[in-house]
Image (cartoon, rainbow, N blue to C red):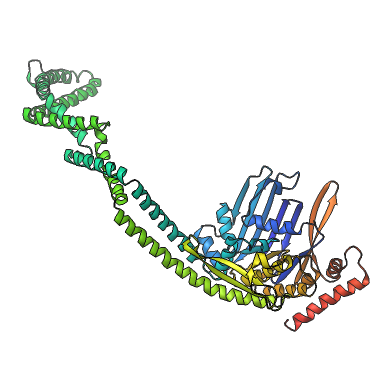
């Protein structure tokens, strides 16, 4: 659950430090005081869109942070560990910073995070129902998402969407193959010829470099032998050979060592040079014996080089690239083979369609079960919301050939009174009825959700009197198992809360700011009285407010 919310320079909120408790908490205050701004701040830290206008006028940046429970072993704790964003045991800290230019940054447990990661964390934490939630139910996507969420069909819906995409891709591939069959056939024929020719050449990777080196040796073999023999003569075998000269110089200097020992280092260098020259002579003899003069092999190598050169010119590339050209031609030919075999493509398309239909039928079964349960629960809730005899039906309307969302659309039908047939929500329900039906749906759906914190932002608009009190009791009952926060203007709803906060607007010079205070005792009575009586609060209004709070406490004591 939400433990703490810290707000700095957000819209008209200067600074606010809010500690939350379990149960049902209401936020009340005058219109324009900033009640919904607190919900907007929470939405921001949960990944909602950031805008420069959210930064308080004159401030450099706005900052919102929220601390939540993250019990070990919970889905949230597992997600944090997998995302390498785990913090202190049992806690999850989210933070969002927006500068005056509109640039936003997100943090999870002190580590920089993406906006998508912030939203993924939020899915485990809070469910926010906005002021216009009833309007979203008029959209097919919202109805479908609500039903799938209620029935735990989110993963099944994801599998259906993936199967639909695969089927659609194969269908497009098959249709393109039929349209371009002649073009593909011509290209395939040309590629087959190229592959045969390049395979016949059998040029292995690195072979060109090896051939060029061998050709250089064979073409200059006589010159190489003559050069090696000349070197042997000069170094060791000819008149005045270098080895003999070095030996003579070394012998002469060694006899002079007894006169000057400084010559020793020079003598050692000369001896080393003599040894190396001798080794070079041995190597030159061996090299000269190994150099082949092979005109036949030279002719073979030159023929091979000529064939490779011809192929390279034909394919307009350097010889080294020919093996890669062969690999590319084979790959393209394989792709054309898949796209050119219309029978095989049709079979793959049919298999993908069968897979889609199988997954879609599983999703339909989940939706039918959820629709039946949701219909009954919402109908039951409507009876307490001044809609006695009314019914609610979550209907699955078949879609020909299906869609990425399954084999059906989700329609919400409602009958506000007994004796009337259920019709589409948008056409049958009045504004007030739509708001009440929406509230019933939200409370029922939220009760089945897994998130620990539920936020309702003035979703009770358009109702009052006895119905408002019933709504308050519904929210209080929901708060028995969840943390429930509600922005409300109805005293009947506020009186049902376990905790009440007042949001007030203050003017300091030219600056307007919102403040939040916890109401207890007489302060809470005074706020309920203000909500009841408007501008002028009388003693009668205060007594009425006290009775409402006292009656609610008595009802709680009896377990209602």
Q: Eyeballing the image, is 459 above or below 286? A: below
User: How many numbered circles are shown?
Assistant: 0
The quarter of the picture where residue 125 lies is bottom right
Asked whether, in this view, residue 32 is left or right of residue 218, the answer is: right
Q: Position of residue 83 (x, y in %)?
A: 51, 58
The quarter of the picture where residue 292 lies is top left
Q: Which residue lies furthest to the front in this view?
A: 420
Residue beneath the point at 23% across and 19% down: 260
Q: Eyeballing the image, is 377 above or below 263? A: below
Q: Which quadrant of the figure contains the N terminus? A: bottom right
Q: Which quadrant of the figure contains the C terminus? A: bottom right
Q: Where is residue 486 in the image (x, y as percent from the top left)?
A: 72, 66
Q: Which residue lies furthest to the top in this view?
A: 240
Nearer-the-camera pick, 115 or 3: 115
Nearer-the-camera pick, 271 or 203: 203
Residue beneath the point at 71% across and 78% down: 388
Nearer-the-camera pick, 530 or 56: 530
Q: Where is residue 12 in the image (x, y as percent from the top left)?
A: 77, 51
Residue beneath the point at 82% across and 60% down: 30
Asked whether, in this view, residue 246 is left or right of residue 72, the answer is: left
Q: Eyeballing the image, is 205 above or below 174? A: above
**Is residue 307 something that shows in the picture?**
yes
**Is residue 480 something that shows in the picture?**
no
Q: Where is residue 537 in the image (x, y as percent from the top left)?
A: 91, 67
Nearer-the-camera pick, 491 or 238: 491
Asked whether, in this view, residue 29 is left or right of residue 124, the answer is: right
Asked whether, in this view, residue 463 is left or right of residue 264, the answer is: right
């Amino acid at each position: 659950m939400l433990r703490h919310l810290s707000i700095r320079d957000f819209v008209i909120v200067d600074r606010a430090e809010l500690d939350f408790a379990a149960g049902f908490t209401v936020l009340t205050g005058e219109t324009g005081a900033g009640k919904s701004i607190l919900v907007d701040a929470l939405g921001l830290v949960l990944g909602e869109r950031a805008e420069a206008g959210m930064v308080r006028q004159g401030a450099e940046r706005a900052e919102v942070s929220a601390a939540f429970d993250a019990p070990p072993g919970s889905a949230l704790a597992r997600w944090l560990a997998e995302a390498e964003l785990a913090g202190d045991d049992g806690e999850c800290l989210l933070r969002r910073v927006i500068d005056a230019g509109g640039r936003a940054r997100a943090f999870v447990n002190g580590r920089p995070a993406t906006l998508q990661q912030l939203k993924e964390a939020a899915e485990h934490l809070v469910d926010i129902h906005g002021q216009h939630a009833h309007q979203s139910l008029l959209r097919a996507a919202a109805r479908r998402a609500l039903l799938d969420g209620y029935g735990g069909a989110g993963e099944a819906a994801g599998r259906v969407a993936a199967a639909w995409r695969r089927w659609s891709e194969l269908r497009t591939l098959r249709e393109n193959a039929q349209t371009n069959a002649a073009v593909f056939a011509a290209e395939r024929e040309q590629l087959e010829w190229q592959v045969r020719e390049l395979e016949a050449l059998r040029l292995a990777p690195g072979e060109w470099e090896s051939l060029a080196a061998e050709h250089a040796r064979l073409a200059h073999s006589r010159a190489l032998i003559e050069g090696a023999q000349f070197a042997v003569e000069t170094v060791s075998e000819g008149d005045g050979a270098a080895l003999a000269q070095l030996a003579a110089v070394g012998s002469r200097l060694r006899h002079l060592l007894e006169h000057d020992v400084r010559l020793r280092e020079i003598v050692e260098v000369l001896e080393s040079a003599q040894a190396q020259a001798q080794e070079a002579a041995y190597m030159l003899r061996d090299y000269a014996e190994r150099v082949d003069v092979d005109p036949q092999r030279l002719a073979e190598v030159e023929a091979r080089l000529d064939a490779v050169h011809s192929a390279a010119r034909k394919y307009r590339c350097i010889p080294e690239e020919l093996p890669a050209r062969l690999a590319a031609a084979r790959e393209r030919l394989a792709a054309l083979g898949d796209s050119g075999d219309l029978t095989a493509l049709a079979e793959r398309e049919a298999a993908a369609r069968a897979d889609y239909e199988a997954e879609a039928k599983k999703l339909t079964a989940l939706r039918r079960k959820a629709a039946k349960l949701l219909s009954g629960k919402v109908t039951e809730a409507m009876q307490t919301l001044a809609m006695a005899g009314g019914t609610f039906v979550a209907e699955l309307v078949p879609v020909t050939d299906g869609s990425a969302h399954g084999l059906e659309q989700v329609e919400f039908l409602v009958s506000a009174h007994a004796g009337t047939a259920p019709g589409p929500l948008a056409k049958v329900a009045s504004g007030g009825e739509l708001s009440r039906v929406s509230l019933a749906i939200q409370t029922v759906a939220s009760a089945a959700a897994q998130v620990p914190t539920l936020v309702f932002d003035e979703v009770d608009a358009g109702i009052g009197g006895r119905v408002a009190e019933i709504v308050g009791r519904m929210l209080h009952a929901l708060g028995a198992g969840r943390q429930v926060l509600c922005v409300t203007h109805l005293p009947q709803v506020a009186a049902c809360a376990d905790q009440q906060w007042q949001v007030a607007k203050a003017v300091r010079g030219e600056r307007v700011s919102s403040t939040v205070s916890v109401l207890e005792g007489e302060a809470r009575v005074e706020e309920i009285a203000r909500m009841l009586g408007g501008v002028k609060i009388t003693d009668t209004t205060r007594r009425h407010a006290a009775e409402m709070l006292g009656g609610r406490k008595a009802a709680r004591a009896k377990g209602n």
